[in-house]
Amino acid sequence: MAPITLEADRTAVVIVDMQVDFCAPEGALYAAGSEAVIDPLVTFAARAAAAGCALVATRDVHPRAQFADAHAYDEFDRWGEHVVEGTAGAALVDPVAALPPDVVVAKHTYDAFHETQLAGWLAAHGIDTLCVCGTLANVCVLHTAAQAALRDLRVIMCADAIGAIEPAHHAMALEHAGWLFAEVTETDEVAFAG
């Protein structure tokens, strides 16, 4: 992979859903692959922040009654209850919370741009490039990255800082994103200028 140099003041690291329910063994939807990327993700995010990049964390949060009258989109039916509003499982894992992020975006779907302040916050801060990491590769990471690209943001996906349930999910998501809209690389191939 070729090295990528990004302008720090125009770049945000978007940390998708690194929450207890996904990344900790006691979590409702724990995946070892999500826990495994905590250290490389935090190391990369801290380096980016030191260079002047913004840090954005998303939190998938569901009010307990969110899907009570759902017709077809019911995450609790598909996955079981997870990241329920007000529960310990909905919290960011400690290493991510300790960074700390410049903004935490609460979302209620796979896409962090859907009915959130994310697009407005990025525009207000002059950000046009996103380094996307977090979990899960083929769910919230992929949907958030795709929406960023459709909003004409440059999307860099940092493969070694993206978690998945299965290696095949990780490979599929990154191959798909790289084919359609993203630059796929590793965190040590990303440098910051400015």
Image (spheres, rainbow, N blue to C red):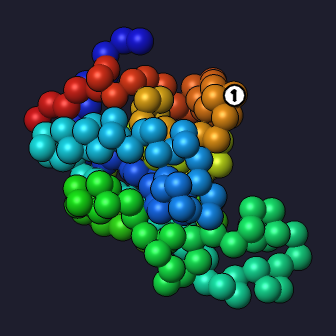
The secondary structure type at the circle numbered 1 is helix
State the residue at coordinates (74%, 68%): 80
Considering depth in this image, is 2 or 34 the residue closer to the camera?
34
Considering depth in this image, is 94 or 194 the residue closer to the camera?
94
At which x and y percent is residue 36?
Answer: 45, 39
Residue lying farthest to the front in this orientation: 26
Residue under circle 1? 168
Considering depth in this image, is 45 or 178 the residue closer to the camera?
45
Image side of residue 146 versus residue 77, left or right: left
At which x and y percent is residue 126?
Answer: 27, 54
State the residue at coordinates (83%, 86%): 69
Circle count: 1
Within-10-Å neighbours for mark 1: few <14, some 14–19, many 20+: few
* Kind of residue at badge 1: Ala
Q: Is residue 118 above or below residue 165?
A: below
Image side of residue 25 versus residue 11, left or right: right
At which x and y percent is residue 167?
Answer: 64, 29
State the residue at coordinates (55%, 43%): 32
Residue lying farthest to the top in this orientation: 2
Where, quadrant-wise, is the N terminus in this rendering? Answer: top left
Q: Is residue 59 visible?
A: yes
Dividing the picture into quadrants, the one containing residue 70 is bottom right
State the residue at coordinates (22%, 56%): 99
At which x and y percent is residue 58?
Answer: 44, 61
